[in-house]
Image (cartoon, rainbow, N blue to C red):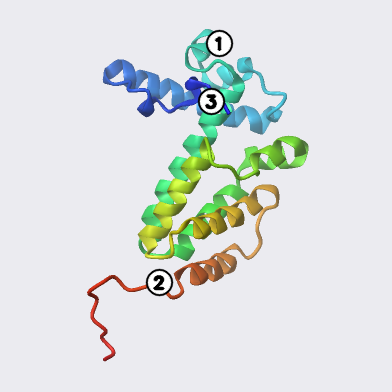
Amino acid sequence: MTIDPSAAPVRERGVHSRAGNAMQRTRAAVLDGAVRAVEKHGARRTTMADIAMLAGIAKGTLYNHFRTKEAVYAAAVDAAVQSLGEECVTVAADDLAEALALAAERISGSAALRRIATDEPAVLSALTSIGDDGAWATARTMGHDVLRAAGAHDDASSVDLVLRWLVSFVAVPGHDVEAQAARLATALSRAVPAPAGTADTNS
């Protein structure tokens, strides 16, 4: 699969200095505009002109950053996953269940995802097909970091379990999210080996 280079985060394209900071601000406005455009029009009906208008920039400026709306969407999803993942890593250091619930609630509460789930089943299907590249690579990395921060199992199968659980909230808002998160956290934390050299305080 060929990824449009314009979808890569600015940090990966080596842009620095004040010009780089301005590009990052414009890019952030574009990604926010894309999310709001999907909320308003749906993913298929949204145009580059819609994204530019809601981002508050000229259409030509948008094309300086992204060639297609699909590249905008890819970057927006990746940025959202990265941001949510970093927040969950911080929370997981204290409470894995709380971190899992936070992620599930954010996904359930996304107006853009709700619009896609209601009106665009084909887009939803593609969005929820777990893969290994693009935003899914970011999701796997962040999932691993969240589990590691919590001291839970952080192997590939555990990360996949978390991703599958979270994906279930894309199509249907969750119920009893906190209880579900607590059960999943318990399963992931069960029988984690103690670090080498740790003394047995019960002996």
Image vertical order of residue 43 relative to residue 148, above or below = above
Q: Are marks 2 and 1 in contact (CB under 8 Å)?
A: no
Q: Nearer the viewer, mark 3 or mark 1?
A: 3
**Residue drawn at (63%, 19%) of the image:** 50
- Marks 2 and 1, how far apart at CA: 52 Å
Q: Which residue lies under the disc numbered 1?
A: 59
The answer to whether residue 115 of the structure is visible from this angle is no
Q: Image quarter for residue 116?
A: top right
The crowding category of the residue bearing disc 2, from other C-alpha atoms within 10 Å (few below 14, some 14 to 19, many at least 20), is few
The answer to whether residue 74 of the structure is visible from this angle is yes
Q: Which residue lies under the disc numbered 3?
A: 3
Q: Earlier in the sequence, mark 3 or mark 1?
A: 3
**Residue drawn at (38%, 59%) of the image:** 148
Between 167 and 90, which is closer to the camera in this rendering?
Answer: 167
The crowding category of the residue bearing disc 1, from other C-alpha atoms within 10 Å (few below 14, some 14 to 19, many at least 20), is some
Q: Where does the image place residue 18, in percent across and percent down from the top left?
A: 28, 18
Q: Where does the image place residue 14, in percent across and percent down from the top left?
A: 32, 23
Q: Where does the image place residue 56, in percent across and percent down from the top left?
A: 51, 18
Q: Quadrant of the C terminus?
A: bottom left
Q: Which residue lies under the disc numbered 2?
A: 192
Q: Nearer the viewer, mark 2 or mark 1?
A: 2
**Residue drawn at (59%, 66%) of the image:** 180
**Residue drawn at (57%, 22%) of the image:** 54
Between 105 and 203, which is closer to the camera in this rendering?
Answer: 203
In the image, what residue type sits under mark 3? Ile
Q: Secondary structure at mark 1?
A: helix
Q: Earlier in the sequence, mark 2 or mark 1?
A: 1
In the image, what residue type sits under mark 2? Val
Image vertical order of residue 171 relative to residue 2, above or below = below
Q: Secondary structure at mark 3?
A: loop
In the image: residue 59, left or right of residue 8: right
Q: How many marks?
A: 3
